[in-house]
Image: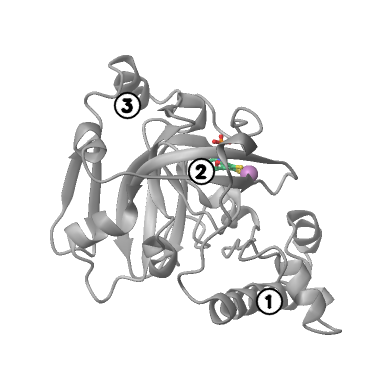
Amino acid sequence: MSDGPSFNRRRFLATAGAGASMLSLGGCDAFDAMLGQNDRVRDVLASANQLTYRAQRLLFGEEALARTYAPSEIRQQMRPNGSTSPNQDDYTKLQKNDFADYRLEIGGLVDKKLSLSLDELRNMPARSQITRHDCVEGWSVIAKWTGVQLSRLLDQAGVKPQARYVLFHCYDSMGATLEGVQYYYETIDLISARHPQTILAYGLNDKTLPVSNGAPLRVRVERQLGYKMAKYIRSIELVSGFANINGGNGGYWEDQGYDWWAGT
Ligand SMILES: Nc1nc2c(c(=O)[nH]1)N[C@H]1C(S)=C(S)[C@@H](COP(=O)(O)O)O[C@H]1N2
Ligand SMILES: [Mo]
């Protein structure tokens, strides 16, 4: 493979043979066009998502690294997208004090709940990586991220055997429905969560992570698309499934029809 582990699933599916082209309907346009049609179409797309997920896991193993870049390749400022300035009271209160009172709570299916300040997180061994961020909207940027490996925190908390996913609760609301305020949320499986490049980032391009990019803490899941990388993390919960959480699809954008598995 000429471009290494930075794997393009369309290319894989193209070489995986005829008939596979249908499966490359991973883009939201194609998916959205299908919404509202009968459930069988949705089921096929959902199983295609599962197939891509399994194929990538098989092909690349659990540890394959996303491509990293040299400092000279950092192209521009990280382009902020989605929420860029949460206006929820609990968030703006923390922001006013430069997040000195912020605490990351880790709970759910763990042996020991954690509550960590930013200083505590910054005092843990740090990891930096220069990677490319791809958004489904069709743009990408290269930036340097610094933070603490999520696996470290999971080890500290102790993950119970029933836990299968890491759920990120965010501070920013995406609007309200009859069920109440919809906060941004995301889930990743424990393999992605324990991947060495999966970090909770507090630094961007050698500076403190700005509010527009998710201060004080956002996750990087480098082998997946931008929407998986929750910004403004309020807390982390270990869960056994997500069928009963919000729309039941494992994330804010997933509930609008995006794939849960967003490997690139
Ligand atoms: N909490 C939260 N996280 C989020 C979003 C958001 O709106 N809210 N947008 C997602 C999308 S679609 C992308 S592309 C990236 C954008 O990250 P950036 O603002 O640092 O560019 O954040 C992702 N994480
Ligand atoms: Mo995105």
Whole-percent x, y for residue 162 in the image? 27, 75
Mark 3 or mark 1, which is nearer the start of the sequence? 1
Residue neighbourhood size for the residue with mark 2, other residues' Cα within 10 Å, grouped as few (<14), some (14–19), many (≥20): few
User: Where is 215 relative to 140, above or below?
Assistant: above
Disc 1 element: helix
**Looking at the image, which is closer to me, 244 or 225?**
225
Q: Is residue 86 visible?
A: no
In the picture, the disc for residue 90 is: 3
In the picture, the disc for residue 178 is: 2
User: Where is 108 relative to 121, above or below?
Assistant: below
Disc 2 element: loop
Please give the count of numbered marks on the rendered protein.
3
Disc 3 element: helix
In the picture, the disc for residue 10 is: none
Mark 1 or mark 2, which is nearer the start of the sequence? 1
- Residue 236 horizontal side relative to residue 15, left or right: left
Cα separation, mark 2 vs mark 1, equals 32 Å
The amino acid type found where label 2 is placed reads Leu
Q: Which residue is mark 1?
A: 48
Cα separation, mark 2 vs mark 3, equals 22 Å
Q: Quadrant of residue 56?
A: bottom right
